[in-house]
Amino acid sequence: MSEVADYVEVHRHPEPKGFVRRWIFSTDHKVIGLQYIALALVSVFVGMFLSLLMRIRLGSPSKSIGWIESMFPAGAPDGVMTPEFYLSLMTMHGTLMVFMVLTTAPQGGFGNYFLPIQIGADDMAFPRLNMLAFWLTFASFVVLMMAFAVEGGAPISGWTAYPPLSALDEAAIAGSGQDLWIVAIALFAVASLLSALNFIVTTLEMRARGMTLMRMPLTVWAWFATAVLGLLAFAVLLAAGILLLMDRNLDTSFFIPGGLIVNDRLVDHKGGSPILWQHLFWFFGHPEVYIAILPGMGLISHILATFSRKPVFGYRAMVMAIWAIVVLGFIVWGHHMFVSGMSPYSGFVFSVLTMAIGVPSAIKTFNWIGTIWGGKIRFHSPMLYAIGFVSLFVAGGITGLTLAQPALDLYFHDTYFVVAHFHLIMGVAAIFAMFAGLTFWFPKMTGRMMNETMSKIHFWGTFVGVYAIFGPMHSLGMIGHPRRYAETTGVDFLAAGGADPLHGMITAAVGLTLIFQLLFLLNVIGSALFGKKAADDNPWEATTLEWTTASPPAYDNFEGRIPVVQHGPYELGGEGDRDFVMQSNEPGS
């Protein structure tokens, strides 16, 4: 704590004894953060495996593969995956990646671990609630995976679960897989609501002396804003899930319309509206995009400043842009529904609002460029991942402007163009932020450095790989290739447009990119066990409060001495050997 000029002594809570209380049912925000990160790591590798199976089906639709049949005898008889099994893979892949990875790791993982330390708190406001939120999330993951094991298998309705496909067994596959999916999402929503309350109260009530709102790091602003998004959005998803579960099991008709004929039989329901589900789901779903990406935006701002040795360009504008995204994020959901038959006037309003939300995103992008412009850039691996994030965010965002136009979206909506767009901006960009965060904070969490060479090899392999995967998908979309189809062989216009070789290229790129992810996992595990010890507690010469603590931090973070904050979060760029001022340094230093 040599970097702390002044501090406030507080009561120290004793560290719990025993493995179970310390590492399993822990109330320590740092352990809970690690638990979220571990759950996300398991989920992401399961999700990537499912995507590999999907690509195998698309790249070699009629090829018999014995090991797939041995793993999934019902889904791949004679080694060839059925179209229904392909749809179940797509559903579970999307659900795992959106909820268990993109929502869990940036907010639950890094947010839980570092938000209290960055604001000078010794824990989250409600430690037991924090523990409960994690175990509800874990229960959600277990229930979701159980869907593979029940009769009928996993649901085939996609991660958006549109009714009537999700509401009626006779419209899909009879079985309890869809029910388990809904229960899993409901559990996840409850966990997210509890976590959001905890983040909001912690940020507002537990800041150290001197930590004014405008001295908070942008990471804290992003986690705080994401908690507000989650509190409002997940409540709607929870209600919608309960109504859908009632439609499936209690013969209600919230989402099932009258006059619906399935398999030549009139369904005995009336009065419901499948469009109502779309409104409820996307009122959650578009804020979910920012729940996934906002923590990454805050982290990238943080890392770009640290490794450019410059203050964040336009700090206050960055804060305002975060809150503009929060507000606008709740009023643009209709652009997901341009093909639902909405009024052209409504479509025009949603189109304008969607273009408007690009403004705060553009502010952040130009400010990121302004941050690194003229800086003394240190190209360590966290910086490379941060630059990769900016590239992917811009590439995905540009196609979002295309899809914001109803006339163009009517053509592109059900094609691979949309798959490429949301994977780049919501999926891969957010995952690059996770890579950046893990490599940046790894020495603080473990006291050891990740292998820099392996990290850089992983960066370049993954960066090239994801563009090789999702770049050609834009071409598939432009020739009209529909998404969600397990096979399109024999479709003349797709063959003439070159769809088959593009699918082969994408499948090969997926396989190679997955190999680089195994390298990253090896780097994480190997570095945690045998990595080079960090030279000191602040190896990156960063400025925020977590770098004043031990590596890893003590149980109560600051060992009973909460630092008094004297400076802003990004005072970098001074002359001489020491070009930074930490938040807890003497005033005027």
Image (cartoon, rainbow, N blue to C red):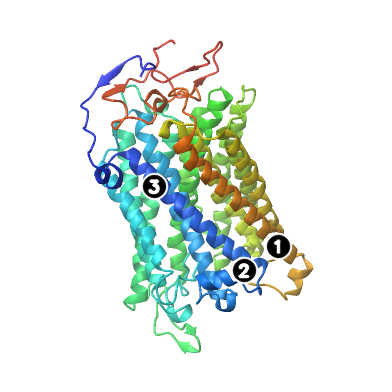
160 relative to 307, above or below: below
Q: Quadrant of residue 201?
A: top left
Residue on which disc 2 sits? 57
Answer whether labels 1 and 3 touch (C-beta < 8 Å). no
The spot of residue 368 in percent (x, y) is 58, 32
Instruction: Give the mark nearer the N terminus: 1 vs 2.
Output: 2
Q: Nearer the viewer, residue 303 or 171?
A: 303
Which x, y percent locates residue 147? 41, 68
Which residue is most to the right?
Answer: 496
Q: Residues within 10 Å of mark 2 (few under 14, many from 20)?
A: many
Amino acid type at image mark 2: Arg
SS at badge 2? helix
| SS under mark 1 | helix
Give the CA separation, mark 1 to mark 2: 11 Å
Depth check, front residue: 48 or 391: 48
Asked if one can make out residue 287 in the rendered structure from this viewpoint, the answer is: no
Which numbered disc, 1 or 3, marks the residue that appears first in the sequence?
Answer: 3
| Front residue of 304 and 196 | 304
Label 1 neighbour load within 10 Å: few <14, some 14-19, many 20+: some
Q: Which residue is mark 3?
A: 36
How far, Cα to Cα, is label 2 from label 3? 32 Å
Disc 1 residue type (three-letter): Gly
Residue that mark 1 sits on = 504
Q: Is residue 564 above or below residue 471?
A: above
| Type of amino acid under label 3 | Tyr
**N-term mark: 2 or 3:** 3
Q: Residues within 10 Å of mark 3 (few under 14, many from 20)?
A: many
For the point 56% across and 22% down, which residue is it? 309
Question: Could you say which disc has been placed on residue 585 in the image?
Answer: none
Which residue does the image show at 42% across and 61% down from the upper left? 280
